[in-house]
Amino acid sequence: MYRHLFGPIRSRRLGVSLGIDLTPGKTCSFNCVYCECGRTLVLTDERREYVPTEEVIAELKSYLSTHPRLDSITFSGSGEPTLHNGIGNIIAFLKDEFPSYRVTVLTNSSLLHREEVRADLARADLVIPSLDAVSEEAFLRLNRPFHGLTAALMIEGIRTFCENFSGAVWLEVFIVPGVNDTPSEITTLRETIRTLRVDKVQLNTLDRPGAVSWVEPVSPERLRELASMLGPNVEIISSGRGATPVYTGLKEARERLISELRNHSRSVAELEHTLKLPRDEIVSILQQLMDEDRVRVFRDERGILYQAWD
Ligand code: SF4
């Protein structure tokens, strides 16, 4: 059983991808309105060892020694991976011991203005930073960052990172209608993206319910229109299905989850292992149960745990 690895999952962008979660329990520097993992539970910009680095490395060593066929080992999970101050050591371990695997980091870009974070990511093969808005107003509305983080800081971080990074960079832009798809937002995004040394731009929109109910998906036609407005090297990565309700067909999973939490306190990774459900669905169900006051969250030496009230 692995506490810090998940999958492998078949990812639209990355192929067969083994996930690494360094910030369990939704620890992030943002609280994005569209976040499919629900609302951020620990909003912070503090870098620290959220889970033991050596434990993550031991799990990777054990898993990869079986030589699994993977297209990517991906730092993603339910929060912002660059908040973990051991990410550089873990990437170095992977590149030293298992160099044939592609290492990918998904980041919200909030810490790329810090030199030590850029140094930590230097040996990754692919980095996918996000940039949803150039105006501070749209940035605050969409990403709801930890105080002090600004769009200008993010853009400066992405720019400096791209200038010094030797791997590939795919910039992800998440479109929320009425916020960052207005003519002025798209124009400033296009002008800013032109100045960044990225290999391509990927446009995304809601495929599952976000953290707040007012966020709507963009239609496939509108996404195509926005892609052509943003520039030549833009691809659409949304499935085009729109937001499908998480609970369709998952009533049974919800009941199993409640019953599991009645008897034990469990982390997201433990629930994922026991229930054999995708992490984002577990997180979404937990979020709804917390909103209904049926589940409480707390922290102990095992990390962030969930328990049913009734
Ligand atoms: S979408 Fe990413 S950056 Fe935004 S709150 Fe969720 S995990 Fe954090």
Image: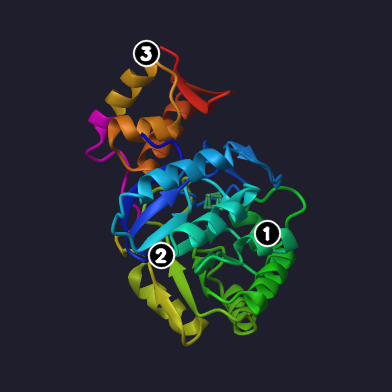
Seen at 59% across and 47% down, the residue is 31
Q: Nearer the viewer, mark 3 or mark 1?
A: 1
Q: Please name whichever residue, 12 or 180, is drawn nearer the observer in this view of the structure.
A: 12
Is residue 18 shown to the viewer in this render? yes
State how far apart marks 3 and 1 are (Cα): 40 Å
Seen at 57% across and 42% down, the residue is 53
Residue span colored magenta:
242-253
What is the secondary structure assignment of the residue under circle 2? loop
Q: Quadrant of residue 163?
A: bottom right
Q: Please name whichever residue, 275 or 103, is drawn nearer the observer in this view of the structure.
A: 103
Residue 286: percent from the left, percent from the top? Answer: 42, 31
Q: Is mark 2 within 8 Å of ligand 1?
A: no
Seen at 68% across and 58% down, the residue is 111
Q: Amino acid at mark 3?
A: Asn
Q: Main secondary structure of the magenta part?
A: loop
Residue 218 is labelled as 2
Q: Earlier in the sequence, mark 1 or mark 2?
A: 1
Q: Is residue 180 left or right of residue 67?
A: right
| Farthest residue, direction bottom | 232
Q: Mark 1 — residue?
A: 117
Badge 1: few (under 14), some or many (20 or more) residues near its Cα, within 10 Å? many
Seen at 50% across and 69% down, the residue is 125
What is the secondary structure assignment of the residue under circle 1? helix
Query: From the viewer's perspective, is residue 148 above or below residue 263?
Result: below
What is the secondary structure assignment of the residue under circle 3? helix
Q: Amino acid at mark 2?
A: Val
State how far apart marks 1 and 2 are (Cα): 33 Å
Q: Are marks 3 and 1 in contact (CB under 8 Å)?
A: no
Residue 246 covered by magenta stretch: yes
Residue 46 covered by magenta stretch: no
Q: Mark 3 — residue?
A: 263
